[in-house]
Image (cartoon, rainbow, N blue to C red):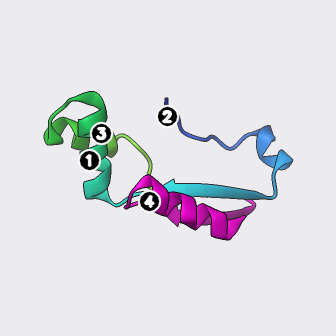
Amino acid sequence: NERPIKQSDFINMFDCVWIVESNRMEQIRRIMTRDGISAEYAEKILKTQSDRYSFPIKTVKIENNGDLDLLRKQISVLL
């Protein structure tokens, strides 16, 4: 289950936020696969989501356009 992160008091518990993102086409493909919906409907879902994240602490952006092994490698470098 995905849900957006909201700035609130919990943010004071951390010194860094990691944001994992994919390009638009990959997001559409994944939503279509996950939900069994059309590209048009997946695009409507994405249009309701915010593209910008702003946190008052350090933010690390991780591009996730490949497979799970590539994502794991990217994360292991950051750890």
Q: Can you tell which quarter of the image residue 26 is in?
A: bottom left
Which mark, by number, is residue 28?
Answer: 1
Q: Badge 3: how crowded within 10 Å, few (<14), some, or many (20+)?
A: some
Q: Which residues are magenta?
A: 54-79
Q: Position of residue 28 (x, y in %)?
A: 26, 47
Classify the position of the C terminus by image quarter: bottom right
Asked whether residue 52 appears in the rendered view, the answer is: no
Q: Nearer the viewer, residue 6 or 31?
A: 31
Residue shown at 60% from the left, 41% from the top: 5
Q: Say if 10 sits above or below 65 in the image.
A: above
How far apart are the alpha carbons under marks 3 and 4?
14 Å
Residue annotated with mark 2: 2
Tell me if label 2 and label 3 are in contact, CB under 8 Å: no
Q: Position of residue 41 (x, y in %)?
A: 19, 35
How far apart are the alpha carbons under marks 2 and 1?
15 Å
Disc 1 on helix, strand or loop?
A: helix
Which mark, by number, is residue 64?
Answer: 4
Residue annotated with mark 3: 31
The mark lying in front, picked from 4 and 1, is 4
Apparent side of residue 36 relative to residue 53 in the rendered image (left or right):
left
Disc 3 on helix, strand or loop?
A: helix
Q: Position of residue 45 (x, y in %)?
A: 30, 37
> Type of residue at label 1?
Ile
How far apart are the alpha carbons under marks 4 and 1?
13 Å
Tell me if label 3 and label 1 are in contact, CB under 8 Å: yes
How far apart are the alpha carbons under marks 2 and 3?
11 Å
Sequence-earlier tag: 4 or 1: 1
Disc 4 on helix, strand or loop?
A: loop
